[in-house]
Amino acid sequence: NSIYQNINKSITNSEKLLAVLIDPDKFLLENTNRFVQNINKSIATHIFVGGSAVEETATERLVIEIKKHTHLPIVLFPGDVTQITDKADAILFLSLLSGRNADYLVGKHVEAVSKLRKTSLEVISTGYILVENGKVTAIEKVTATKPMPRENIENIKDTAKAGQLLGAKLIYLEAGSGAINPLTEDIISQVKKDLDIPLIVGGGIRNKSDLHKAYHAGADLVVIGTAFEQDELFFEELKK
Ligand code: 1GP
């Protein structure tokens, strides 16, 4: 079964999914074994690897190391074409729908194709929507785009729906890594109600209550990076 099919199957069975995001730029390779053992023992279902600014070979080195210690699917969440590696299982082929920077809507994707042809990665078309969260995040700087204002939910909803109608297989609603405010339940639930494809939610989710609020509002898969980076005990807290 493909990773995408499995996501859909879980959703049909009303299961909620959790991805741990590892940013190769912030992560020390020598910590991989311990960190991944913690992931294996946790409720996490996926490992996402990616970041906004990553040195050329760091992603591949990290993915190889992670693979040694887990059977969980490893999905690339690339900030750039250089982060593509055949060592992972799948790639979120992200189009930044919240912005109007052509490079991030379709340009980088054209650049990526010659690399993707040489891999057996499962490519999952993903509409990526950045919503403001209280501070300027790395994605905003790197992509030179503005996040969508959170009060204009109608516009966020329409953007997500446009992504689906354009053929996206997933919508990723993003508050940005290290966001001060995670996305509101209102935004998540309104977007979800209007979609027929799975919804990923991430950015600023730091405790169990945030996680459950996101699930309850309609997130099918939640992505958490910073909270695990800062405190590995968070893996334990989620089990309780
Ligand atoms: C970032 O949505 C992810 O792209 C995760 O964000 O690091 O704030 O958990 P955090």
Image (cartoon, rainbow, N blue to C red):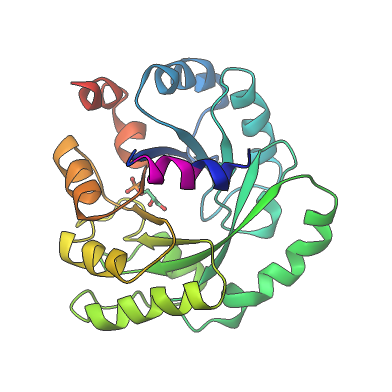
Q: Is residue 142 above or below residue 7?
A: below
Residue 148 location in percent, x, y? 32, 77
Between 92 and 149, the residue placed more toward the observer is: 92
Residue drawn 66% across the image and 39% down it: 89
Q: Using the rendered view, name the quadrant where residue 104 is placed.
A: bottom right
Residue 52 appears in the rendering? yes
Residue 72 location in percent, x, y? 54, 28
Residue drawn 63% across the image and 33% down it: 63
Q: Using the rendered view, name the quadrant where residue 57 is placed.
A: top right
In the visual, does 48 lie left or right of 60? Answer: left
**Magenta residues: mostly which secondary structure?**
helix
Quarter holding the C terminus? top left
Residue drawn 25% across the image and 46% down it: 205
Q: What span is in magenta?
A: 7-13
Between 221 and 179, the residue placed more toward the observer is: 221
Residue 161 location in percent, x, y? 41, 76
Q: Using the rendered view, name the quadrant where residue 199 is placed.
A: bottom left
Residue drawn 51% across the image and 50% down it: 51
Residue reaching furthest to the front: 12
Between 143 and 148, the residue placed more toward the observer is: 148
Quarter holding the N terminus? top right
